[in-house]
Amino acid sequence: MRSPLKKIPASRARLGMYVRRIEGKWRDHPFWRNSFRVADTPTLELLHALGQHEIWIDTRKGMDEEAPVPPPPHGDVLPALPDPLPEPDVTRTDFGDDIVRAEAIRERAKAATRALFEDARMGRALRMESLAEVIDEVDNAIALNPAAMLSVVRLKNKDDYTYLHSVAVATLMMALGRRLGFEGTALTELGLAGLLHDIGKVGVPDATLNKPGRLGPLEWASVRQHPEIGWDILRRDSVAGPVALDVCLHHHEKIDGSGYPHKLDGESISRVARMGAICDVYDAITSDRPYKRGWEPAEAIRRMAEWQEGHFDRAIFHAFVKLIGIYPTGTLVRLASDRLAVVLSQSAGSSLTPTVRLICAVADGEPLEPEIVELEDGVDRIVGIEDPAQWGVQVPQLLRV
Ligand SMILES: [Fe+2]
Ligand SMILES: [Fe+2]
């Protein structure tokens, strides 16, 4: 299925299109909203005046371009990808739309990663073609709404953990890379490195990877081989560039030299491998595993801040916290006004003032209009984090609204 969202130069806008987002900061353009229908000529002229500045249009809510680009031909080397999730006939908010779209991208990325791991397991040449396609899709989704894409890759069940963990690390690395100034092919390489970083786990028995209890010394030694096994697989095929090879081999190194396989320390660990270490640990500890429940993102960030001294690069970790937030997307928060809200996305300024959507009054649980409040404006503030289970709230469902 082709995505309903499409990036075009503003000069190609026409009446009847629905603009979902204008690239860049709001100061760069004259529109006070980011999403709107091109309903009149003055609006159209303002858009045309932006020239090559890029805009995202939603072809489900408005007109498409006159001559749609034909879908890419299907080569027979690509693994069969599943159909996207069915679209229920409901009206969603723009945020809910982005979540549903991100879920479809996550499923396609998972299928491509599963096919890749199968190739590695069988000793076949790795089919990389479909990876470039999914990395492109993930990158577009991050550009449009990083909070939506980051929140859908966190939820996994134990059967597809390895594949979704790879997709999650790829997403985190590209989102972090954008923050750190990576562009173009450098971003693509980060995504590829994320998808491939644990490919060496095909050389570790499943019983060990999924063991509910503590690992014995031999099992632990086997797990610790996965970076080198992966590196050998990638080198054998010569399919991965230096970034993917480096991240695969060194994503378990720690700044204080206590990591593996080479006990590298400080600057001797490359920047991309230090980024990989942070993204890898965050996703691992926020995911449910056979031996423990995943932590809530806010709790994970707090714990990682405690460990950061020896484990992580301080500057990269700070950029990561800005990306994820002190109150990450999906966190249930209590506001000073005694209202309950769910965090949708981070604000450009402080990590303490995300954008939230109201849910209900604390006093009587009375549902509130699902109004979006930008806490950055100072109209309200967060006074605490609440447990979704205690309120009988399903966060994934809340975000899909
Ligand atoms: Fe790993
Ligand atoms: Fe990993």
Image: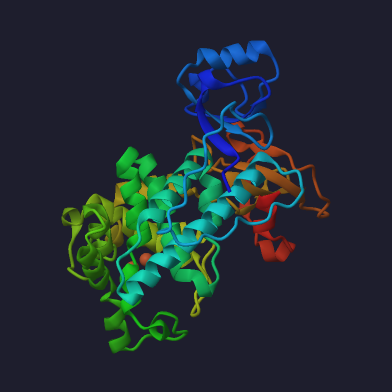
Q: Quadrant of ligand 2?
A: bottom left
Residue drawn at x 22%, y 60% as measured from the top left: 238
- On the picture, is 75 further left or further right than 157? left
Q: Position of residue 315 (x, y in %)?
A: 31, 46
Q: Position of residue 396 (x, y in %)?
A: 64, 57
- On the picture, is 24 further left or further right than 226? right
Residue drawn at x 64%, y 15% as measured from the top left: 43
User: Is residue 253 visible in this depiction of the protein?
Assistant: no
Q: Position of residue 19 (x, y in %)?
A: 61, 28
Q: Is residue 221 above or below residue 390?
A: below
Q: Is residue 360 above or below residue 282?
A: above
**Image quadrant where residue 279 sits:** bottom left
Residue drawn at x 63%, y 50% as measured from the top left: 100
User: Is residue 352 visible in this depiction of the protein?
Assistant: yes
**Image quadrant where residue 197 sits:** bottom left
- On the picture, is 281 further left or further right than 295? left
Q: Nearer the viewer, residue 128 or 331?
A: 128
Number of marks drawn: 0
**Image quadrant where residue 120 sits:** bottom left
Q: Position of residue 338 (x, y in %)?
A: 73, 47
Q: Is residue 332 above or below residue 206?
A: above
Figure colour scheme: rainbow
Residue drawn at x 35%, y 61% as measured from the top left: 127
- On the picture, is 296 further left or further right than 43? left
